[in-house]
Image (tube, grey):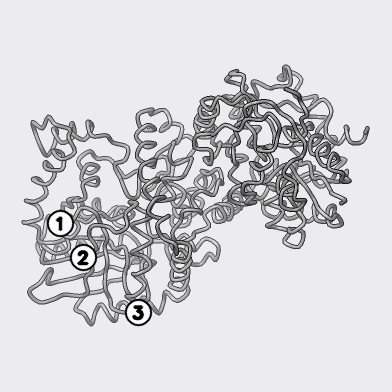
Amino acid sequence: MKVSPFPAAAEHELANVQLRRNLRAATDTIQSKRARVVAELPDWEALRDAGSEIKADVLARLDELLVEFETAATAAGAHVHWARDGAEAGAIVARIAREHDVDEVVKVKSLTTDEIQLNDVLATAGVRAIETDFAELILQLDGDWSSHILVPAIHRNRTEIRDLFARTIAPGIVSDDPADLAEASRVYLRERFLRAKMGVSGANFGIAETGTVCVVESEGNGRMCTTLPPVLVSILGIEKLLPRFDDLEVFLQLLPRSSTGERMNPYTSLWTGVTSGDGPQELHIVLLDNGRTRVLRDEVGRQALHCIRCSACLNVCPVYTRTGGHAYGSVYPGPIGAILTPQLIGIENASSLPYASTLCGACYEVCPVKIDIPRVLLHLRAEAVRARGRSAERLTMRIVGWTFESARRFTLAQRVARTAQTPFARGGLVRRLPPPLSGWTRSRDLRAVAKTSFRSWWAGR
Amino acid sequence: MRIGLFVTCLGDTLYPETGRAVVTVLERLGHEVVFPAEQTCCGQLHANSGYPDEALKLVRRFESIFGSYDAVVSPSSSCVGHVRELAPELAPRVFELSELLVNRLGVEDVGASFPHRVAYHPTCHSLRVTKVGDAPLRLLRNVRGLELVPLERAEECCGFGGTFAVKNAATSSAILADKCDAIEASGAGYCTAVDGSCLLQIGGGLERRSGGVRALHLAEILAATESA
């Protein structure tokens, strides 16, 4: 997999004025809700520290925690599988479906399954995966894909959704009232929940101590998937573990406040193995690597694995709020995507993503688990430079560096620039420059090199 | 106090008036300002573009030039933040101008007069890296005749981001457009900040719009003694 270059993808998205308006309105709302509920907690900073420390501890001893999780989950009656990558995980899920003669599964909203394109893998195996999260359903019906971690269809408005429903699951629907749209999806989904023989979920957390899987959600459709069908398969990215059940206390405060801006999310589902006569009678847990152990090897970059997928960093990002999620070319958009995707799929496959940031630091400020995103971005930029090898930019930066190493060379460079700008400068401003600097002058004037530099003025003082 | 002035590569070349203003303000307060002529760039450009080795070389060079001063001042908060991070020994003696004045020298009224409406844009690095807090605002509130006007979404980035402005020109321009809209809507005649690079971006956008609003470094307002 390779991600298309961000600058061009972003420029394409920027042309969509409606998208920018939708995004801005939606992210503004979530952002201000978040700020309000975060301000209520006097120990918010201590919670962030705790969240960050627990996650760092998990990554430091992931090997033993994974085994502990497997042992506890197995003892509780779950079947635990290990998958090196998306293909292995998909094959495991498809095999389970085949063994139970299942051709349709209902799905809980899950980024991890999107990451490994599980629906496509299942389709190839003759199994239809039905997305049951309202926004995920919209995207599935439209053949579209997620542009936000929390609100995947943020780029669609309700009229567009009404038209889509009229074409697909609710012929004849005329109202675009949210309640009517929700009712249309309810009618469609209820039937599928009731007939489903198998449910598929991701996981927000896995508890090593008890072998418990946890999913938090707003709609309750996820709980339908995890309780109604007799067979349940949960796919867990290996970094989702927490050592102890008590650790949930920290994360169930951090996540809803950072994510939806709520004190508590409406549905928190926890399941530990199987219970006779209650819920699914067969539980499979797939522990997925898919690049995560590679991320773990990088001491600076590994903090990206702290992420609890709250999406707060997206909502405050000056870049994301203009371009939307599709420009990032992955299911993980925004600042977290810019540091996670290149690490998961290799910097050579996503080398423009670490540059998709102004380094403003707003993301780090809101991150509930204190991922120093700007620091990781710089680290990955250096990796990208290394991976690219020789390039015009590298040569330029070398020459610029060499120039800066001597005041005499720097002064000479100032003089050269002053002469070189003559054809472009008028009245102290440069209005048009040749590429690659034309990027600047397309929307901005550039201050011309001053007639008298500061150092010349000082020398003549 | 003997203060070493780091004028920055950008300030030296494009905005000499900002450096001159820093000298004016500090000398007016009775301090000795020295400009070590060996200085060039702090290396932030390289650090932010993925060239940490080159950046470190330039920071070391900076240390050797400025190591002997009681205090080092710069009109660029992002350069100060960069130097503080990579030269921790020197860090306690390196200041952005407003920090030096308010926190180190304890001055909030520098005797300036600037009878205009001014919007203050708190730059990202001054807020989140250098953490200058409200030092610039304290200084602005004491400038005679100056009317500070509120800026909508003041704490949002201007879209500069170093090479981002060129590599991702379209996105950078979209972010800038919103910042310029906010500045124009504020009714200010001037937008000020403590980073020359952000002012290059904001000023460039405002000039292109020809709306008559100007970007001006805080130092130049503090140096001004215009009468109403």
Q: How many residues crowd mark 3 within 10 Å: few (<14), some (14–19), many (20+)?
A: few
Q: Count numbered badges in the picture.
A: 3
Q: How many residues crowd mark 1 within 10 Å: few (<14), some (14–19), many (20+)?
A: many
The mark that comes first in sequence, 2 or 1, is 1
Query: Which residue does the image show at 75% across and 34% down from the upper left?
Result: B112
C-beta proximity under 8 Å, tags 2 and 1: yes
Q: In the drawing, does residue A270 fall left or right of residue A244? A: left
State how far apart marks 2 and 1 are (Cα): 10 Å
The residue that disc 1 covers is A105
Residue A261 position within the rendered picture, expressed as x and y whole percent measured from the top left:
34, 51
Identity of the amino acid at label 3? Val
SS for dot 1: strand
Q: Chain of mark 1?
A: A
The residue that disc 3 covers is A67
Do marks 2 and 3 both belong to one polypeptide chain?
yes
The one of B107 and B209 positioned closer to us in this rendering = B107
Residue B161 position within the rendered picture, expressed as x and y whole percent measured from the top left:
59, 41
Q: Which mark is residue A233?
A: 2
SS for dot 3: helix
Residue A23 position within the rendered picture, expressed as x and y whole percent measured from the top left:
37, 37
SS for dot 2: strand
Q: Is residue B185 visible?
A: yes
* Residue A451 against residue A223 in the figure, above or below: above
The mark that comes first in sequence, 2 or 3, is 3
